[in-house]
Amino acid sequence: MLFRLALFTLLVVVAACDAPQRAQESAPRNAQETPAARPLSKQQVDDRSERCAGMSREQFQRAWKDAKESSADGQVKAEFAYHYNTKSGTCFYLLTVALPGTLKKMLFDVKDGELYGEYLGPAQVDSPAASRPKTCRVENLYCASAGEWDVLAGPYMQE
């Protein structure tokens, strides 16, 4: 019985001593496997920006052939902007749709189609009668006005 207890204690001590060494050994491997990304050259940024422009233009033309559409309430106008963000390595596409009295903005990642933010609210933001937007968010942050939305969406569309 005493022999079993001594053997069990010895196994526990050996196993406990070995565990931290494994954790310490794996940390340097992970650091070596993921080297820091090198900054892009001006030519690479220009190339990616041109591709971003092409993808954005194509996306817009697929959805809005002539950028105007008639509805029962009046004419709907659409426009787009794009920006290749070097910090995130993402091509962002901002679609703005102006309906009579209402403005809708949507910020997308063109390549993945992921919606980063959206705004749906009054078109006349300077008007004293302007109400709060129905939708106003960029990622997980919510906003209460078109101005706040522009501040939240700004870093995606510029460096």
Image (cartoon, helix red, strand yellow):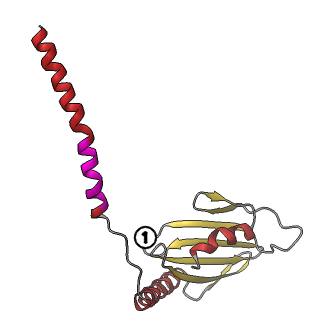
Residue 23 covered by magenta stretch? yes
Look at label 1 and name its amino acid.
Asp
**Residue plotted at (52% across, 79% down):** 63
> Which of 52/64 is in front?
52
Q: Quadrant of the C terminus?
A: bottom right
Q: Which residue lies furthest to the right in this view?
A: 128
Picture coordinates of residue 7, whole percent (x, y): 12, 19
**Residue 1 picture location, percent across and down:** 11, 7
User: SS of the residue at dot 1?
Assistant: loop
Is 50 placed left or right of 155 in the picture?
left
Where's residue 49, x and y in %?
47, 87
Q: Which residue is drawn at 46% across and 88% down?
A: 54
> Was residue 74 drawn as part of the magenta stretch in this picture?
no
State the residue in front, 47 or 10.
10
Q: Residue at x 23, y 44 (%)?
A: 22
In the rendered structure, the answer to whether residue 47 lies left or right of residue 104 reads left
- What is the quadrant of residue 112 in the picture? bottom left
- The magenta segment is 21-31
Magenta region, main secondary structure: helix
| Whole-percent x, y for residue 146 in the image | 73, 69
Mark 1, residues whose alpha carbon is within 10 Å: few (<14), some, or many (≥20)? few
- Res. 123 image quadrant: bottom right
User: In the displayed image of the protein, which residue is found farthest to the top?
Assistant: 1
Q: In this view, does 48 lie to the left or right of 14?
A: right
Residue placed at 74% from the left, 63% from the top? 133
Residue labelled with disc 1: 112
The answer to which of 136 and 72 lies nearer the viewer is 136
Q: How many labels does the image show?
A: 1
